[in-house]
């Protein structure tokens, strides 16, 4: 009985885990006006969109698990007060407009307009997603080179030690990456790309294709919560006594970076990262449809949410956006 009580206490303590800032010594790629604008990129392949369906015109409530903090220019921080635990995810806190798309089978101008809107949504976000993945790819490459050198007996210089320490903290890596082989492997599992198909599907669902109040007012594409009043939007239907806010971002690019860092660092998505590492090991390329299996903790709907994200990927042929990343490791 005592063992059972201790186990329950351990689970509750884990649920109270704090926040950590996203930190990287690598700035966004060149070509961004002011550091965060939209770069000039080639036209991306756009799959032919099928008739839109109203089933994708809403988003489910989400759990409070994506809880990293993203404060550019500041070193990461691990803990927050225990009383700042996120409120339970409940659908009445969701403020997504309804009837965003015609019902399945609808034809005519309304259907064509909805298709055009979705195509524009993908076109707008794809350059930002690819830019963040390029940054992560460069960071992963340089981190791997440094870690391989350390594994070969080379001593890290002061700059390398500082960089590795900051990365280990930001990505919640246990152990000393300078001396611990397991910690090095964990860091490389976490510093990696997120397939565009997965990011696009979640953004479409969580932001109602960019039309939700939180997307319009706060550039929040992924339903991220916060407890910082200076960075949040109060949900109109928030339950009495609840303190959670919906995170406000300076740009959609910042929202995308925060989202990817959440998947890469939060304990709730360890399964997703393990599957991604296995894909890297066997050289099969990153598959957003398969990785969606690791998102059961992202929403209160659990497995139903996973099925919804996979349906969006299939319905809009979003796997086509992943083709460019299949040969990269």
Image: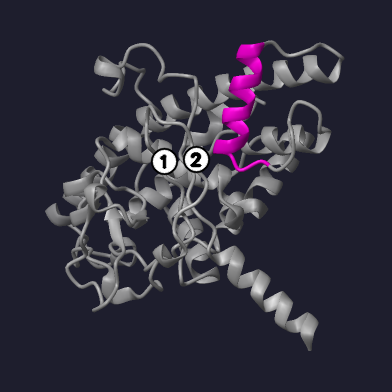
Q: Is residue 166 magenta?
A: yes
Per the image, label 2 sits on a secondary structure element best described as helix
Name the residue located 20 percent from the left edge and 73 percent from the top edge: 237
Tell me if 23 is positioned left or right of 224 in this view: right
Start-end of magenta stretch: 158-173
Image x and y of residue 195, in percent: 53, 39
Query: Marks 1 and 2: in contact by CB < 8 Å?
Result: yes
Left or right of 163 in this view: 128: left
Q: Is residue 218 left or right of residue 194?
A: left
Main secondary structure type of the part rendered in magenta: helix
Q: Position of residue 27 (x, y in %)?
A: 42, 19
Residue at the bottom extreme? 1
Secondary structure type for disc 1: helix
Residue 69: percent from left, percent from top: 42, 45
Q: Which residue is mark 1?
A: 258
Depth check: 38 or 289 in front?
Answer: 38
Q: Nearer the viewer, residue 143 or 44?
A: 143
204 sits to left or right of 301: left
Quarter containing the N terminus? bottom right
Number of on-image labels: 2
Q: Which residue, as the protein is rendered here, is positioned at the far front?
A: 81
Q: Which mark is residue 149?
A: none
Residue 261 shows which numbered tag?
A: 2
Verify whether residue 8 appears in magenta: no
Q: Where is 243 relative to 51, above or below?
A: below
Q: Is residue 23 above or below residue 34?
A: below
Residue 282 appears in the picture as rendered = yes
Report x, y in % for residue 247.
30, 51
């Amino acid at each position: 009985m005592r063992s059972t009580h201790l186990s329950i206490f351990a689970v509750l303590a884990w649920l109270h885990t704090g926040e950590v800032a996203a930190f990287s010594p690598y700035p966004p790629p060149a070509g961004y006006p002011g550091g965060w604008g939209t770069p000039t990129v080639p036209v991306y392949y756009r799959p032919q969109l099928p008739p839109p369906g109203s089933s994708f015109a809403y988003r489910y409530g989400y759990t409070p698990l994506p809880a990293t903090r993203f404060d550019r220019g500041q070193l990461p921080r691990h803990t927050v007060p225990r009383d700042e635990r996120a409120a339970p995810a409940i659908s009445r806190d969701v403020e997504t407009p309804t009837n965003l798309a015609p019902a399945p089978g609808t034809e005519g101008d309304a259907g064509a307009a909805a298709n055009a809107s979705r195509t524009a949504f993908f076109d707008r976000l794809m350059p930002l997603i690819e830019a963040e993945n390029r940054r992560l790819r460069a960071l992963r490459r340089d981190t791997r080179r440094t870690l391989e050198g350390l594994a070969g007996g080379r001593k890290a210089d002061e700059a390398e030690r500082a960089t590795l320490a900051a990365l280990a903290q930001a990505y919640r890596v246990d152990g000393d990456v300078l001396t611990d082989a397991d910690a090095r492997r964990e860091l490389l599992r976490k510093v990696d790309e997120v397939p565009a198909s997965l990011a696009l599907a979640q953004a479409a669902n969580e932001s109602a294709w960019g039309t939700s109040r939180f997307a319009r007012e706060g550039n929040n594409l992924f339903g991220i919560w916060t407890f910082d009043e200076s960075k949040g939007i109060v949900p109109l239907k928030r339950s009495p006594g609840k303190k959670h806010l919906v995170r406000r971002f300076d740009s959609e690019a910042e929202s995308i970076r925060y989202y990817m860092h959440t998947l890469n660092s939060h304990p709730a998505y360890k399964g997703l990262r393990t599957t991604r590492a296995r894909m890297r090991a066997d050289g099969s390329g990153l598959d957003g449809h398969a990785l969606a299996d690791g998102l059961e903790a992202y929403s209160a709907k659990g497995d139903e949410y996973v099925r919804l994200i996979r349906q969006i990927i299939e319905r809009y042929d979003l796997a086509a956006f992943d083709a460019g990343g299949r040969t990269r490791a």
